[in-house]
Image (spheres, coloured by chain):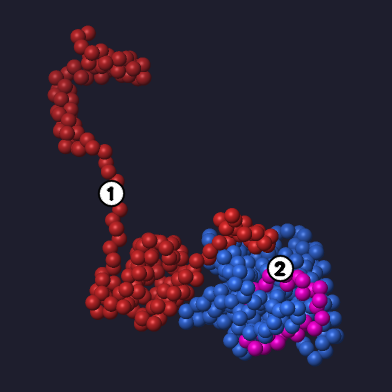
Chain colours: A red, B blue
């Protein structure tokens, strides 16, 4: 034994010997000793080393989430119909921030209630764009009314504690001094 | 012309409030209906109000001292030191939901204190029908959710309604409740000869079809119904966990999370049969 490296290899070989048994080892040793096989192995190892070198060693980073871009139909309104643009832009901001219609289901319900063209997607982002696309076609008066109605979609507190406070005439904890 | 329907059964827990709320949603929100529906919560337990409003909105009504059904029954009660003011019928109504190009759901909420009206029920039975007559032209359907005991509220509901809808759970005690209702209606018709309330029908609620006890009770109720010439709805409301879940979420069966399409289709069939019966 000359080097630590050779010692490490020996330890690994002993482990593998224990794992696979002596017979496959003897067969493999005979194969490797042939010059043809050793040439093949050498080529393969060189190729592997090359590929390994080209792959960056840094950890794969997760792609940062793209901020959803404002639908073109909406940005196009900016100069033509600034009032409508403002109404829809505020709504779009709320939708993206999920302060209104936080789920895809909520959007679909709202669309159904407003009798707007059905949203046929499983992506909330696409549903937002589709909703904005449908609302753009409405006159400002109708649009305002529909946006205002969104406030009513908040189902609010439905907790049993809340009911208990009402029935027992108690103030909610936060109001207690 | 408005259709006024009282949901009555002398047995509690048969699903009166749940059915009232789900019917309101069905006729107001479904594309092929789009009706204006008013739900009148006549039960001091205020289940229909809880279902439709949720804690915050209900609390807001109490905090702002907005009139409720209690004010309807106590509007003429004199309290020393307090100035009497007449009750504006529109103030008692709270909008729950407005659907675009379609219907709306309004509510006259109830409150626990309504139970105190029972202590002095004299001269109160006509107050509800008088109030409703002032606002009924705004609605296509008015659903009155009644408490499960015979009282001035039941009489008020009979006097206000054109029809009675009787939800029945297929249980032994519920079958007894149907007999109590027969007696209640008979007594009402004797007392108020000129006023005829039609029976829209009996609807079996929370059915599953697999329980022998259910089959036995069904036989009993059908027998009572046949003997009294009462209509029994062909489409029952089947048992589904989505109904109590809907109450928690403040949603009807067709909007409750993970509710099965088949369940709300069944409710829908009943609702449409109900509409046909009352000529909605």
Which quarter of the picture shows residue B205? Answer: bottom right
Task: Name the quadrant of the C terminus of chain B.
Answer: bottom right
Q: Chain of mark 2?
A: B
Residue found 80% across the figure and 91% down from its top: B194
The stretch in magenta equals B108-135
Residue denoted by label 2: B112
Let me know if marks 1 and 2 both belong to one chain.
no
Residue denoted by label 1: A63
Q: Position of residue A18 (x, y in %)?
A: 36, 16
In the rendered structure, the answer to whether residue A156 lies left or right of residue B225 reads left
Predominant secondary structure in magenta? helix
Q: Position of residue B163 (x, y in %)?
A: 71, 82
Q: Position of residue A145 (x, y in %)?
A: 43, 78
SS for tag 2? helix
Residue found 35% across the figure and 69% down from its top: A90
Q: Residue furthest bottom?
A: B194
Task: Name the quadrant of the N terminus of chain B.
Answer: bottom right
């Amino acid at each position: 034994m000359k080097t630590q490296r050779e010692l490490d290899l020996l330890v690994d070989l002993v482990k593998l010997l224990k794992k696979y048994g002596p017979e496959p080892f003897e067969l493999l040793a005979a194969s490797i000793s042939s010059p043809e096989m050793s040439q093949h192995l050498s080529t393969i190892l060189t190729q592997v080393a090359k590929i390994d070198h080209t792959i960056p060693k840094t950890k794969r980073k997760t792609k940062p989430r793209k901020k959803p871009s404002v639908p073109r139909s909406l940005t196009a309104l900016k100069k033509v119909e600034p009032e409508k643009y403002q109404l829809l832009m505020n709504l779009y901001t709320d939708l993206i921030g999920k302060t209104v219609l936080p789920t895809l289901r909520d959007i679909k319900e709202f669309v159904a209630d407003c009798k707007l063209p059905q949203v046929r997607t499983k992506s909330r982002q696409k549903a937002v764009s589709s909703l904005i696309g449908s609302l753009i076609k409405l006159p400002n008066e109708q649009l305002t009314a529909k946006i205002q109605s969104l406030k009513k979609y908040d189902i609010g507190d439905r907790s049993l504690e809340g009911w208990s406070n009402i029935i027992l005439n108690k103030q909610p904890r936060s109001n207690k001094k | 012309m408005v259709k006024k329907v009282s949901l009555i059964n002398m047995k509690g827990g048969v699903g009166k409030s749940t059915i009232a709320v789900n019917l309101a949603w069905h006729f107001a929100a479904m594309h092929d209906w789009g009706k204006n529906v008013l739900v009148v919560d006549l039960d001091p337990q205020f289940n229909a109000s809880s279902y439709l409003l949720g804690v915050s909105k209900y609390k807001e009504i109490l905090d702002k001292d907005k009139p409720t059904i209690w004010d309807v029954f106590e509007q003429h009660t004199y309290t020393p030191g307090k100035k009497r003011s007449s009750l504006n019928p529109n103030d008692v109504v709270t909008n729950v939901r407005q659907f675009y190009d379609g219907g709306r759901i309004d509510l006259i909420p109830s409150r626990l204190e309504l139970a105190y009206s029972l202590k002095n029920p004299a001269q109160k039975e006509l107050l509800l029908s008088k109030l409703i007559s002032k606002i009924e032209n705004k609605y296509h359907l008015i659903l009155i959710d009644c408490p499960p005991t015979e009282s001035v509220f039941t009489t008020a509901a009979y006097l206000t309604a054109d029809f009675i809808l009787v939800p029945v759970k297929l249980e032994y005690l519920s079958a007894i409740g149907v007999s109590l209702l027969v007696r209640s209606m008979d007594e009402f018709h004797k007392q108020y000869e000129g006023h005829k309330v039609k029976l829209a029908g009996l609807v079996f609620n929370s059915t599953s079809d697999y329980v022998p006890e259910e089959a036995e009770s069904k036989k009993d109720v059908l027998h009572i119904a046949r003997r009294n010439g009462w209509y029994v709805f062909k489409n029952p409301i089947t048992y589904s966990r989505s109904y109590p879940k809907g109450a928690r979420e403040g949603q009807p069966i067709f909007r409750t999370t993970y509710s099965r399409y088949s369940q709300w289709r069944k409710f829908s069939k009943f609702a449409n049969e109900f509409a046909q019966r009352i000529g909605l």
